[in-house]
Amino acid sequence: LLIVASVAAAALYVVVASRQVTAVHPLPAALTQQTWALGFVLLCAAVLSGGELWPDLTVEGLLLAAVSGVLNYALPFWLYLYALTRMPVARAATYLTLIPVFGVLGSVVVLQERVTWLDLLGGVFVVGALLVDAVAGATADRADRADQPEAEPYRCDVGRAA
């Protein structure tokens, strides 16, 4: 149920974020989202810990947390919001299916976990489906451009009688 809820939340995020980037540039949008998320997490941590957040927090730990936040959250969300300004929401949402693929790859590289044949098969299906979607989307985009009449070059008619 938690995984299904997380997928639903991610889908909702894509739709809401696509509306936001029509009014706000991707970088300020990502910074705003990440700042609110940080505030929410700190509030939850304060409530759950009874006010004692991290008694043994060091400067090094704080810097590692900040770098991790930028690399793992702020940068990817900024790039995703930027992509939403360049492609339809439905196509951008399909790329969320890569999250488990990168999760499995990360677990292999960082945690030295083993990949099963089912993991490989799932990854191949996800990447294959995205490739088919990308090719079909590019073909559809070319067809749409071919159907539109070519714009006339700009001509300056200054001094000519109307």
Image: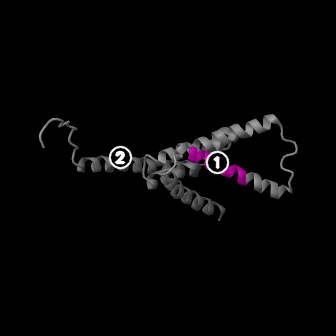
Q: Determine the residue positioned at 24% across, 49% down.
A: 148
Give 116 or 157, whichever is nearer the viewer.
157
Q: Determine the residue positioned at 69% across, 40% down.
A: 68
Side (left or right) of 42 relative to 7: right
Residue 69 seen anywhere in this rendered image of the structure: yes
Q: Which residue is mark 2?
A: 138
Side (left or right) of 66 relative to 76: right
Task: Quarter of the image for the C terminus: give it.
Answer: top left
Relative vertical location of residue 72 with respect to residue 4 in this rendering, above or below = above
Residue 22 image point, x, y percent: 47, 51
Residue 104 image point, x, y percent: 61, 46
> Is residue 15 highlighted in magenta?
no
Q: Which amino acid is tagged 2?
A: Ala
Residue 144 image point, x, y percent: 29, 50
Give 4 or 15, whichever is nearer the viewer.
15
> Is residue 32 highlighted in magenta?
yes
Q: Determine the residue positioned at 70% across, 41% down.
A: 111
Q: Determine the residue positioned at 58% across, 59% down.
A: 7
Q: Which residues are magenta?
A: 28-40
Q: Please rate how many residues cluster around mark 1, counting C-alpha atoms within 10 Å: few if below 14, some from 14 to 19, many from 20.
A: some
Q: Which residue is mark 1?
A: 34
Mark closer to the chain start, 2 or 1: 1
Q: Which amino acid is tagged 1?
A: Gln
Q: In terms of secondary structure, what is the magenta stretch mainly?
A: helix
